[in-house]
Image (tube, rainbow, N blue to C red):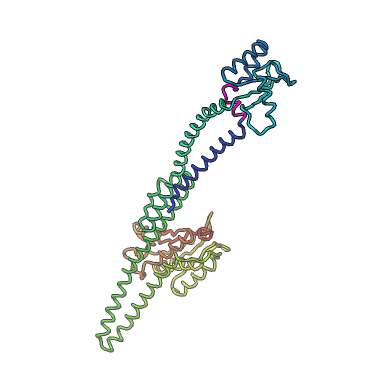
Amino acid sequence: MRSLFWRILASFWLAITLVAGLSLLMGHVLNQDAWILSRHPALKDFSEQWTQRFETDGADAAEQMLEEHKRRYHVDTQVLNEAGEAVVPGTFPRRAQAFEARQSQDDRQLPWRRLTTEYTSPSSGDTYLFIYRIPHPELDAWHRESLLWPVGALGIALVVLTLFSLLVTLSITRPLQRLRGAVHDLGQATYQQHSLAQLAARRDEFGVLANDFNRMGARLQSLINSQRQLLRDVSHELRSPLARLRIALALAERAGPEERERLWPRLTLECDRLESLISEILVLARVDAEQASAEAVDLQPLLAGIVHDARLSAPDQDVMVTIAPDMALRGWPTLLERAADNLLRNALRFNPAGQAIEVSAQAYASGVTISIRDHGPGCAPEHLAQLGEPFYRAPGQAAAGHGLGLAIARRAAERHGGRLVLENHPQGGFVASLELPFEPPSAA
């Protein structure tokens, strides 16, 4: 497997090295004359020094300077004025001038390198043309010496660039390795949210990705844990009706015809209870598995239909409805209907006769609140936090149920990006509220 670390490191290193090397090489090749004139010790600043000597001390001193320059550096120099005439005789031998004249049109290489440069005196304003002839052996020797510092500088630059590329590569691949470890832990259902805490503190794209991954991991871990807990609770809750069915069947097998007739209603009741429990478990499982697209939901007819069914099933109970017209949001009608119906039927179980159940829907800044209040005994404060967990029933309840109605309502609220709020009313009774945003997250 090819490592992303080495590929990124090699790419950075090769790209920077090629750019630096090619820049140096092209600059040396394309500007070779300028390179020699600016770097060679015999040519660097010589035109300025000679012009100053010539204008200050005269032609003889300037000619003597050219002779000393030739003896020291082995460079022949000639200086011309603007008219093209020699300012001083210079150091060019006549045979050299004649040889250059004969060879200038040939393809054969001259035994020297010719370089020219102009210099304008800042004091007199005169312009001088300097013609240098450097023997190739001298020039080659200087090239070998002059290239030592670029090679050394290039070596240092390569070391620095390598370290820089290494740091950049590590800053990219190390977060990826941590994310890979977190993905592996998530796949093994052993993910710990604090494992990416250091990465999530970064203020770059990896920090944003780690924060998103933390939220996703926490959500998936919570779902996994809830599914495991649900399986344990389901197995526990199914064991009781199945045990009662076995006992009833065993009694029916041993009983006579008359006793068997008396046991059939009990068997039917236990089957109905088991069917009801399985139905509610399936509804709870479908809440998180809802894959349909969100749609516009008009709350007035939805709640009106639920209240109508409740009045038919409990004619002795009174239900008061307060819903503003044209109140709508986006969501899943089936889930909202099931959640509100469970809350209303839960209120019907505990509401005393002669007291009206209050159903209301109010809009706030970013969503809608659906509240259902009964006038029953309420719930002990220490048990409020556990209400809404699957199969949990507060101690002391005599009403029938499996502890899934509030769990279904809570899952439906969370599916819409909202929450289920359960609390005791200050004036008595119990209030269950669905706080739902206008636009659920999954609808984006």
Residue 438, percent across and down? 53, 59
Q: Residue 120's quadrant in the figure?
A: top right
Residue 318, percent across and down? 46, 69
Residue sitting nearer the eye, 127 or 6:
127
Q: Residue at x 69, y 27 (%)?
A: 102
Q: Relative to 69, is 203 on the left or the right?
A: left
Q: Residue 252's quadrant in the figure?
A: bottom left
Q: Is residue 35 magenta?
A: yes
Residue 401, percent across and down? 36, 70
- Is there any visible trace of residue 427 in the rendered image? no
Say above or below: 141 vs 57: below
Magenta stretch: give its range: 33-44
- Is there any visible trace of residue 442 in the rendered image? yes
Q: Residue at x 64, y 26 (%)?
A: 115
Q: Residue at x 51, y 59 (%)?
A: 440
Q: Residue furthest right?
A: 83
Quadrant of the frame with the N terminus: bottom left
Count of residue discs = 0
Q: Residue at x 62, y 29 (%)?
A: 33
Residue sitting nearer the eye, 22 or 287:
22
Q: Residue furthest bottom?
A: 257
Residue 307, percent across and down? 49, 70
Quadrant of the frame with the C terminus: bottom right
Q: Is residue 343 magenta?
A: no
